[in-house]
Every structure is written in structure tokens, then in C-alpha cells.
Amino acid sequence: MAVILGCGGAARAVVAGCASLGVRQVKVVGRSPQRLNDFLDSWLNSHLPVRVSVHNWQELPNLISQADLLVNTTPVGMYPRVDESPVSADEMGKLPKGAIAYDLIYTPNPTLFLKLAQEQGADAIDGLEMLVQQGSAALQIWLQQPVPVDVMRQSLRRHLDLLD
């Protein structure tokens, strides 16, 4: 089961990605009841083989304990809030060992969210590859020809290392 933090556009992409990978149950956690309801309504006519449910932030500790995948799609942890995590250390302590924690944020690397997850024995993945793949897909559409994904990835890594 996947637990997604946030209910914006990035969360929508993660739900679709989860469905394509065979995840059958996705629980989306947010702070705004209206945005959560709108998010859920947007999946009512979906033909994707995934069951989406929405939950308020107070339910998070119980959901984390059931998660195989925990994904942060919120901006918490990104500049200027680099010393914050959308999940507390106590909440992250409920994440099962061997679960995957994925933060769409790619800088700083690792984010506090990923540090907390690693301390619990989770596999931690940052958002750099998502950024690379989004950029390469857009560039390929624009240029109407294959693009050098490996070169783009290396260049981005070099650029981000310069920023640290």
C-alpha cells in the first residue's frame, strides 16, 4: 500500500505511477478537506486499476505503519524550509523496516524526510531522477527527437553539486 503526502498535481502523477507499477491501494493524506475531496472526485471516472482514498493529516501515524511506500509530494523540506519534514521522527518511527520512502524534492540531498526514513531502515529515494525524466520527456517532445538522458542527468548532478 502507498501513502502519499499532499494532494496537488505531483500527487496525481504519483497515483498514476503507482497504478502503472501495480500498486492497488493508495492513501492520500492532506490538510485541506476541500482539496482532498476535490482530489478524490478527480479519480471517480478513472479507469486505472487503483483504489484511491483520502485521509486527513491526523490519520497519518496509523497509515504510515501500513505503508510499503511513503511519498512526500509537499514542498516541506525544500528551500527555505530545509530543516523541516512533513513527518515527525515519531511518525516516521512507525514506518515498517524495508519500506520505501520517496521524496520528490531533490535538493537538499538528502532531505530531513529521507534522513528520518533511513534511520528507520527504509530505502530512501530522492526526486532527482523524476526531474531528469520529466525534463528529458519534455525536451524530446519539443525537439521531436531522442535526447541524451545520461548527459542531462550528469549535468544536473554537476550543477546541484555546485550549489551546495
Image (cartoon, helix red, strand yellow):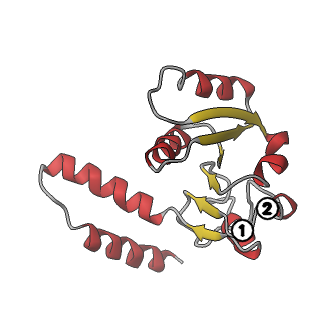
Q: Which image quarter: residue 113? A: bottom right
| Residue 117, label in figure | 1
The residue that appears at 28% across and 57% down in the rendered structure is 136
Q: SS at mark 1?
A: helix
Amino acid residing under circle 1 = Ala
Q: Is residue 107 left or right of residue 35?
A: left
Residue 105 location (% of width, % of height):
56, 59
Residue 97 place in picture, x, y as percent:
73, 69
Left or right, 66 with respect to 111, comes to: right
As shown in the figure, which amino acid type bears the numbered disc 2?
Answer: Met
Q: Position of residue 108 (x, y in %)?
A: 59, 69
Q: Residues within 10 Å of mark 2 (few under 14, many from 20)?
A: many
Look at 15% across and 59% down and name the residue there.
146
Residue under the image location 59 percent in, 28 percent down: 39
Q: Which residue is mark 2?
A: 92
Dot 2 and dot 1 residues touching (CB under 8 Å) = yes
- Residue 136: numbered disc: none
Residue 154 location (% of width, % of height): 33, 76
